[in-house]
Image (tube, rainbow, N blue to C red):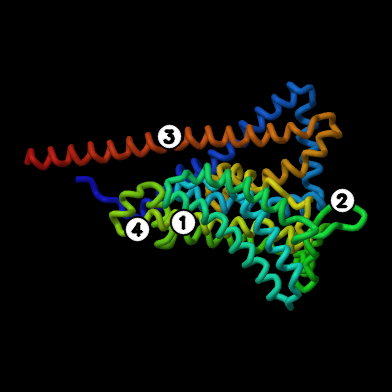
Amino acid sequence: MSKKVPAWQAVLRGLGPRGMALRIGAPVLALLISLGITMVLLRVTGADPVSSVQAMVDYGTTPNSVVDILNRATRYYLSAVAVAIGFRMALLNIGVDGQYRLAALLAAALAGALSLPAPFGQILTIVAAMVVGGLWAAIAGVLKVTRGVSEVLSTIMLNSIATGLIAYLLNPKRLAEMRPGSNNIATPQVPSSGRVGALNGALSAIGIDLPGRLYGLLPVAIVVGIVFWVVVNYTRFGFDLKVSGLAPGAAEASGVSAKKMIVVTMVTSGAIAGLIGMPELLGASYEYSLNFPAGLGFTGITVALLGRNHPLGIAFAAVLFAFLDQTSDVLQEVEVPKEIVGVMQGVVVLTVVIVYELVRRFEIRREQRAVAGELATGHDLARAGKGR
């Protein structure tokens, strides 16, 4: 019989040179391939690939651009984590976009109507946004467990309903007011006591001076990623979450209610989605208006897929997409349409998915060969024992 490998040895084996090479080499290889394909596409459009990429890098590394990239990445990261929570249970929460926009609107209206001393105003606004996002996502979870409605269909419909509800509420007769001298409609401004200051002051204290305003809620996004990683990998809830998604029958047999986990997962995903608009609301615009960032939920799906639902991978993917979005305008200076950035993002995602799938199949074959080798060794030892 083959000797059972202890769990700690299995972990170390995965962290060995070959395991680390696969985990690090796969995304690097995918990005290199996607870069090559992108340069070919740029050449097809008649642009100089080298000068185009160089212009993006030069513009994206300026101090102002770095701040904007980090701010964009903060929103993308929170959106991707909200999506990844559902992915962990094989749930596709497409409704993140509607959840965060509705949460931001109602939280902005609440913050604009109250004037509480810090930090109570900020905490109340953030909690309100998470509650709204969680309750809106819970609708899809309840429909799935009680009526068998696919969360994909229900969240798509809920996005449309949220859009209509926002259009109804964002009205001078209801939660908003007209901005003098413009056609913009916005909620009352968040009072100064309810705003979150930029991180520039704290960074200046350690010798880092940035020209723009860096979101003060950036640390919150980091904490969310850490908590997500710990809960999913090192808690009973995280184990039940994955088991319920992979094998609902086995989960039920072990005493875990798969239906309850579906609702809890959707509520948790929606609550994190409620945080997406908070960095912008409390740290920059201080109001919900027609100009409030939209479409972040759909970007989060792409970023979560690119980061393989891992907090660290999502962070790199969020920064990459933020960089591409930030540098899209500079392409016009080298006579390249900025829409090519959307093509580049699609190429990156497709390439990464293909490379990851090839790596997954390679790992499966490697494990099969290892198991076959151990079985053969055990068989030979058994035959040798019988021959004595």
Label 4 vs 2, first from the N-terminus: 2
Q: CA distance from mark 2 to mark 3?
A: 57 Å
**Residue drawn at point x = 60 percent, y = 36 percent:** 349
- Secondary structure under the numbered disc 4 in the rendered image: loop
From the top left corner, tell me how far across and down residue 85 is, in percent. Answer: 51, 53
Q: Residues within 10 Å of mark 2 (few under 14, many from 20)?
A: few
**Residue drawn at point x = 77 percent, y = 30 percent:** 50
- Which of these two is toward me, 317 or 189? 189
Q: CA distance from mark 4 to mark 2?
A: 53 Å
- Secondary structure under the numbered disc 2 in the rendered image: loop
Label 3 vs 1, first from the N-terminus: 1
From the top left corner, tell me how far across and down residue 254 is, in percent. Answer: 29, 57
Query: Disc 4 designates what residue?
Result: 256
- Which of these two is toward me, 336 or 12? 336
Query: Disc 2 designates what residue?
Result: 183
- The amino acid beneath tag 1 is Val
Query: Disc 3 designates what residue?
Result: 362
- The amino acid beneath tag 2 is Asn
Badge 4 vs badge 2, beta-carbon distance below 8 Å:
no
Residue 44 against residue 21 in the figure, above or below: above
Residue 371 lies left or right of residue 13; in this view the side is left
Taking the view exactly as shown, the residue that stands out farthest to the front is: 173
Query: Disc 1 designates what residue?
Result: 263
Please say whether residue 240 is visible from this viewpoint: yes
